[in-house]
Amino acid sequence: MSAHKEGRRIRLGLVSGDGLPVSGLLTIFKNIVDLGVRHGIADGRVAADLGYSWRPDKPGFFPAGDPGITYPPWLTVTSWHPGRARRDPGAWGQLLTRIRRAAADGEAGTDLERAAREIEAEYHGHFLSWMTEHAIDWVVAVNMTLTDAVPVSRALASAAAQRFSGRPGGVLYWDHDLLGSCGIIDPGTGRRYYPAAPNLWTPIPAARRHNRWAVVSPGLRDEAEGYPTALEPQLVPSILPREPDAQLGQRHYSFAGQQGLDLQAPVLLSPVRVFSVKGVEITLALAARLGQLLQARGERQPRLLVFGSLQEEPAYARRVVKAAADLGIGDQVRFLDGVPLASHRAADGAWRLDEIDLLALASATGGAVLFTPSVQDVETIGLGPALAALAGIPCAVTPYKAYDAFYRGALSDVRAHPGEEGINAAAEELLSLMAGRARRDPAVLSRLKSNHAALGDLFPVRPWLDLLQDLSSEFGRLPDGESPGGPGIPETRRQAG
């Protein structure tokens, strides 16, 4: 009998390789937790390590996070980091960067091998204590197959092998990006940030009793099936949030007042981090041209809300802020410093709205979503178009490979090709859709309704519900004829998970 039928709710923990306090992946995870709670499968309380201490490329949050961030009551976030990270964050970050680059190149000297083993031992103790303290049944490991910190990924694997020896539970590796599909270029070297394929340094989830592996798109499943492990990757699409409210509430009006938004003008959303591959500068150009077209019609200028934090990649953020000023729309853009998991009042009394409430603002004001990756082979889904379809508003999208592969022509969005001509054409088409929606044009409404209807097939809930039930059914038994995985560090690098 599964745990949810017996009333035993499994306790989830989260380890994220992103190194960020707020990201789209955490929002999706919240949707999954909500699903588990509604069906009596999962406990609503979650302990998390968000990877601050091993992501020196996120300087605004390295190595202990941002003490000013407010987390929802259901999420307990650790700020643990090794003693040497406290004593000398600069040296700690340099060591982690050297190891990451060695992993990308597939080779390292003896000194890095030794340093990696020492780091692995430190994090092994941390993860084991953390799992025990919070009585975690299943650790959801987000993007830990990427090589942001090889010794940390290995440590999680070895700690889990010890923790779940002879007991149910384990690790669910949940990958939204994999090595080949994530073509980020390291600005320090001009080479790939991650290796293009697994090598002797890359930790791959291993086929052990306590491991599961979920990927979010068919493309990732195909890539994962070629990895050197017998663990079978499951395709488990992301879960979208609930639809935004049709009517705005007091929190929306308060937020608008605090942000200086004119709710008689369109609110445009850029649901991305302020990270170079996300193409925020393209979004700015598109928003600026849209504003020019509206002004020529004698209509109000739009306001653009960019979800991400200017702290994540400061050098790029400075270029983005300058681009907004050069385009003459600096006063029309708001950087939201990360969108929270739930709308709330901050300590200063200001409202911070979550993804659903921001979509409600865009919908109520006749706005749109702008989703403009600048690199074609980084996004593995790109949820911007899906969020627009959920809210029933238009979306403009730059070309990227996963859009055609994942959405498979199910969505009818505006294609925005970079460059002045492409941006101008996209802005004109987008404005036509926005105006058509406002006047209830049947053709436009039918197009947006069709987008919304496609979401059920693209983002079904059943795979996640089945997976959660499978995790819960693990309790109270071990598979016949199988012995539990043993403790200790895995012997081979290719089976490090």
Image (spheres, rainbow, N blue to C red):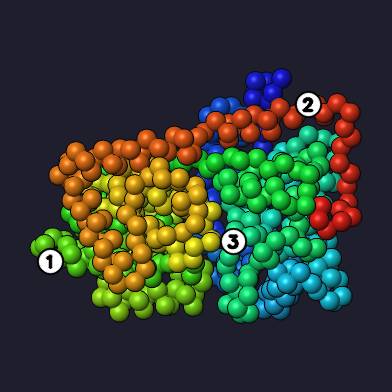
Furthest-left residue in view? 298
Residue pictured at 46% horizontal, 52% vertical: 403
Q: Could you tell me the amino acid type at mark 1?
A: Ala
Of the numbered discs 1 and 3, the one sitting upstream in the chain is 3
Q: Look at mark 2 in the image and give the residue it sits on.
A: 476
Label 2 SS: loop
Q: Out of 30 and 211, give the one closest to the viewer.
A: 211
Q: Could you tell me the amino acid type at mark 3?
A: Cys
Image coordinates for residue 185, horizontal then vertical, percent: 58, 72
C-alpha separation, residue under disc 3 versus residue under disc 2: 39 Å
Q: Nearer the viewer, mark 1 or mark 2?
A: 1
Of the numbered discs 3 and 2, the one sitting upstream in the chain is 3
Q: Residues within 10 Å of mark 3 (few under 14, many from 20)?
A: many
Q: Could you tell me the amino acid type at mark 2?
A: Gly
Q: Look at mark 1 in the image and give the residue it sits on.
A: 296
Residue pictured at 38% horizontal, 45% vertical: 411
Label 1 SS: helix
Q: Nearer the viewer, mark 3 or mark 2?
A: 3
Image coordinates for residue 485, horizontal then vertical, percent: 86, 41
Question: Relative to residue 403, is residue 181 drawn left or right?
Answer: right
Q: Look at mark 3 in the image and give the residue it sits on.
A: 182
C-alpha separation, residue under disc 1 versus residue under disc 3: 41 Å
C-alpha separation, residue under disc 1 versus residue under disc 2: 68 Å
Q: Out of 41 and 291, give the one closest to the viewer.
A: 291
Image coordinates for residue 451, horizontal then vertical, percent: 35, 41
Label 3 SS: loop
Q: Answer yes or no: is residue 497 visible.
A: no
